Amino acid sequence: MRPSVQEMIAQSKGKKNKKALEKIIPVILFLIASVSVLTSIGIVLTLIFETITFFTRVPFFDFITGTTWLPFSNNEAQFGIWPLIIGTLKVTMVAIIVAVPIGISAAIYLSEYASENVRRVIKPILEILAGVPTIVYGFFALTFVTPVLQAVFPEIKIFNAISPGIVVGIMIIPMIASLSEDAMSSVPKSIREGALAMGSTKFEVAWKITIPAALSGIVASIVLAVSRAIGETMIVSLAAGSTPRFDGDFTGSIQTMTAYIVQVSKGDAGYGTTIYYSIYAVGFTLFLFTMAMNILAGYVSKRFREEY
Amino acid sequence: MRYIEQQTVVKRMNGRLIANAIFKYIFLAATLLALLALVILLFRIVSQGAGNLSIDFLTNFASRFPDQAGIKAALIGSLWLMMVVAPTSIILGVGSAIYLEEYAKQNRITSFIRMNISNLAGVPSVVFGLLGLTIFVRAMALGNSILAAGFTMSLLILPVIIVASQEAIRAVPGELRDASYGMGATKWQTILKIILPAAIPGILTGSILALSRAIGETAPLIVIGVPVIIQFLPAGVMDTFTALPMQIYDWSSRPQQEFQAVAAAGIIVLMAVLLFMNSIAVIIRNKFDKRY
Amino acid sequence: MTTIITNKSVSGATADQTAKKAVYETKQLNLWYGSNHALKNIDLEIMENEVTAIIGPSGCGKSTYIKTLNRMVELVTSVKTSGEILYRGRNIFDQDYGVEELRTRVGMVFQKPNPFPKSIYDNVAYGPRIHGIKNKKILDEIVEKSLRGAAIWEEVKDRLNENAYSISGGQQQRICIARALAIEPDVILMDEPTSALDPISTLKVEELVQELKKDYSIIIVTHNMQQAARISDKTAFFLNGEVVEFDHTDTIFSNPSDKRTEDYISGRFG
């Protein structure tokens, strides 16, 4: 006769490997989960060690105060980071000028005005915009936006800060729009109804109630978008040029921190040269900028979150 | 005494309603402007590149001559890259998510891991390139191989996969878990037999979207030294290779006008691959939506 | 039941009846949510300076009806209406009657307190500000008058700049009433205003309603029959989207003419 199910269960209970498995699995999973921590540690250590090597050759003070970036000069190489920072900020500034008004307007439209059906169409399209590879945006900046700009403003050069700035702006619109929309949509419906019941127009509800209530989320979305713009690489590598400059000109070739790293990487600066180490110093500076922005975004959204 | 005069309220009402209407159209116009940018971008690329698309374009290697240039090495190279990235990133990502959702205690280490993941997601991809260059290319001496690039890309998209998997696991109803435990199942049995099968559509959708990001990333590949002019196909993961975005970058940055059309054709191929991957993700999401 | 009725004040309700005018006249109102016929042939006349209670089991349409009176119901898509509601003689569904204008005259207090995430002062000053009052001194006066009107001035006068969410739920609800009073409305709609409050806060709001009816017409939806009996002059009993009975509150509770009303108020269902 067949043993009962409970008997069969009792027999298999005795097996040792089952208990061992229950003990070892969490350990394995913990090790897997620590890979992300190791990655962060790896990034920080890599940047620190190679940057230290860089600073044994180029004085730290020269790097952080210098206003001339001239790495490829044979006898008079200069490594003052400011021209690259200025280049990065120029592109970021243009991007923010483009993306903030459009992104926030889209967020307001989606959260306050659009019907559920309209939202269901527009949001996925914005997601597509967010999913376009940056190399494609770079190509678009170089072969479309720059020529169009040149047709209107002949003084704009083939490489400039405006065209990649605009396209970086287009790239970060979905980020600002979707994060801001999330923040606005999380303002409870009952609060909106309270304002509407007093005779407010939708615009007044958005402007006086929803936006102030969601402000921390909106600001955080902008800060995160700034971080993305600072770290953006391919658009500026293709369309901004490779001329590190310490001035306020947006119409001519510039160079950003990211574009410099790419420029060196695709050249053949040999391993161990000062130029090789310089990309780590620049990378570290870039890392600090974006990290500061990310931490600021987290702080803003936690510290100034509205309670309701 | 009354502070609010009904007449002035009515008088002001018109202005307020006009402001409301004007701003509504401003907001709508801004939204449409963003969509218009996408339309122009896609239209430009298709009109520039469609003429260069052909079977030859898919089966030729790169060339100095625009009319002979093809994308074969890059397309196959990107597929090889995905064969490394997909298993590596999914195993690491899903494993981390299971640990965080099912095993991790609410302590400092756990909250540190969580915070670390969200910070990692904000690191620029070019910095991941520097990590890959130091650790995989040099320290582990993998060179500019598929494996080195694959590991670098896996770490880049790891945070995305972890977060997506966490959400999918969290969405599995507690009752299913309770039912399994109620029959005397162990924790790992419950995870393996109940939670993972229920969470797999969400995990797959998130993973495919993350992989489609990896397939379009260029900067880390440039930094770890992936070449562009490749006249052969890789035979294994230790071989050197090139990838779609690298090839497109190379064509785009050439001064000759003809290569821009070639680059546009390359972009069409890349976008087609992305469209294919995203469609699969959407199909999975729709098919398994709202099962419980 | 009888104890409740004796507690109620019904002094002079009929004496000045003839002098009163109707604020709302609802004529053959029908309302559908998609295909769901939520209100059926409603006819109701609501008088000024009275408290009109609307009672009925959940799902009877009482909340829908009160939200129709200021057209808040239209925030739900796919709502259709027929018939008319005259507010002070004018059909609120008229093409040229803007909802904003209507809602300026008709204030509303909701089930759950919903102050704006702003200071107490800014909550109350919100209405006057959107209607163009910017003078700080006048705003101060309005805020004080409204908070006094909502019987909460003494409790919050020293913390006007604190966030409205820092005070208790009962206080929040009275802030919401003050917020509605600040634009000096004609009618105040109250949609189960005490359902989220503790008994003491409920009592305060009920006392306030008695006070407010001197200056305002009040329509209150409540799921609590004792509350209706305590505070209202007239009561409408809704069932399945229809008005079963509408009469003086003491009549409804002591001598209802419809069997269903009697069943409901004696607790046989609902």
Image (spheres, grey):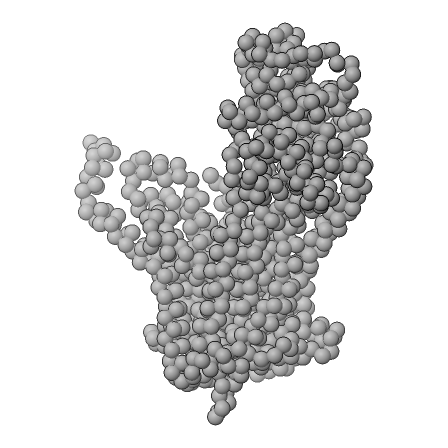
Q: Is residue B190 left or right of residue C110?
A: left
Q: Which residue lies furthest to the bottom in this view?
A: A75
Residue B91 shows in the view? no
What residue do we see at 70% from left, 13% from top? C13
> Tag count in the figure?
0
Quadrant into which the N terminus of chain A falls:
top left
Q: Could you say which quadrant of the image residue C211 lies in? A: top right
In the rendered image, residue C207, in percent from the top left (x then y), is placed at 59, 22
In the rendered image, residue A51, in percent from the top left (x then y), is placed at 40, 77
Q: Nearer the viewer, residue A2 or A89?
A: A89
**Whether residue C167 is situated above or below residue B278 in the rendered picture:** above
What residue do we see at 64% from left, 77% from top? A249
Residue B117 shows in the view? yes
What residue do we see at 43% from left, 62% from top? B120
Q: Nearer the viewer, residue A22 or A209?
A: A209
In the rendered image, residue A193, in percent from the top left (x then y), is placed at 63, 37
Q: Could you say which quadrant of the image residue B236 lies in? A: bottom left
Q: Could you say which quadrant of the image residue A60 lies in? A: bottom left
Q: In this view, does B259 lie to the left or right of B141?
A: right
Q: In this view, does A135 lie to the left or right of B188?
A: right
What residue do we see at 68% from left, 64% from top? B40
In the rendered image, residue C222, in percent from the top left (x then y), is placed at 59, 22
**Whether residue A139 is situated above or below residue C226 in the rendered picture:** below
